[in-house]
Amino acid sequence: MLEIVAVGLTALFVTASPLAYAQTAATPSAADWNNLTDMRIDLVKAALKLTPDQENYWPAIEGAIRARARDRQARFAEMEKRVTELRQGNPVEVLRNRDPIDFLRRRADALAERSTDLKNLANAWEPLYKTLSPDQKQRMVFLALYVLHEVRNVAEERTEDEED
């Protein structure tokens, strides 16, 4: 049980890191993003304690995790670029020239990309998941739920800070 708590706490710090970066003026570098991805991968792999046979499925999962992280990094960079451009403009002109249709299309494209990444990740995980022991599945579920809970809490705090 103590091991699961330790993994959960590590997941909290690893998961909350990009959100903390997003709240500061400093933009994480490509190396920061890569280090964060490496830590996430190591955390999940360590929590599962894969058998030698299960290790054969890991490269596909790691590739899907890295592709998703790379795409997320590109989306953040694009958002940052757009926000910077908007901030540099005249606020009145920015409001006057807003295009809600363009916004909806950009949002739809981003959601479609995220959907594809998640489907690829699920497809990569499926063969390994079928081989996991009940104990490994329990650790995976705990880790996933804990991370989702913490991400939600950070997002709620961020929303509250923006409202203040």
Image: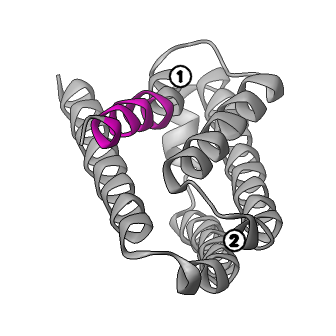
Check disc 2 and give the amino acid type.
Gln
Choose mark 1 or mark 2, whichever is in front: 2
Which quadrant of the structure image shows residue 118?
bottom right
Tell me if residue 104 is in the magenta stretch: no
* Residue at the spot 50% in from the left edge and 27% down from the top edge: 17
Instruction: Name the residue furthest front.
Output: 52
As rendered, which of 29 and 124 lies closer to the eye? 124
Q: Which quadrant holds the N terminus?
A: top left
Q: What is the number of the mark on residue 54?
A: 2
Q: Which quadrant holds the C terminus?
A: top left
Residue 43 sits above or below residue 112 on the image = above
Judging by the rendered image, the residue that carries numbered circle 1 is 21
Residue 96 sits above or below residue 109 on the image = above
Which region shows up in magenta?
3-16
The Cα–Cα distance between marks 1 and 2, rounded to whole angstroms, is 34 Å
Check disc 1 and give the amino acid type.
Tyr
